[in-house]
Image (cartoon, rainbow, N blue to C red):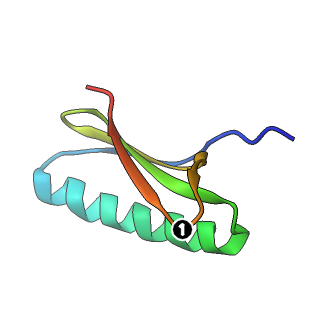
Amino acid sequence: MIEAPELLATITAISKTTLEDNLNAAVREAEQRARAEGRRGILVTKVDHSRVTVELSPDVPYGYTYEKRDI
């Protein structure tokens, strides 16, 4: 079975504080889901200067959070 990433959140910033608060909440939710399944890690991608995605990814080992930039 091939696993695909599961997009959990796309966060668009209105302000830096809003981005950080929403990102932290999304990562906490991702951590809970990752713990429940025990197979995939968390990938946080900065898409551009005001948008970030959070997903569970089979490319990230369970128990880890990786960050990448697409800008």
**Which residue appears at 41% of the width and 51% of the height?**
66
Q: Position of residue 21 (x, y in %)?
A: 25, 64
Quadrant into which the C terminus falls: top left
Q: Residue 25 appears at what percent x and percent y?
A: 37, 67
Nearer-the-camera pick, 31 or 10 = 31
- Residue at the image point whose x is 43% and y is 71% from the top: 28
Tell me where residue 19 appears, x and y as whole percent. Answer: 22, 53
Q: Farthest residue toward the left?
A: 16
In the rendered image, which residue does mark 1 sit on? Answer: 63
- Assign a secondary structure to mark 1: loop
Q: Looking at the picture, how far across and down is residue 1, in whole percent?
A: 87, 41
Quadrant of the image occupied by residue 35: bottom right
How crowded pointer 1 is (Cα within 10 Å; few <14, some 14-19, many 20+) is rated as few
Residue plotted at (69% across, 39% down) = 4
- Type of residue at label 1? Gly
Q: Quadrant of residue 18?
A: bottom left
Q: Nearer the viewer, residue 69 or 51?
A: 69
Toward the right, the furthest residue is 1
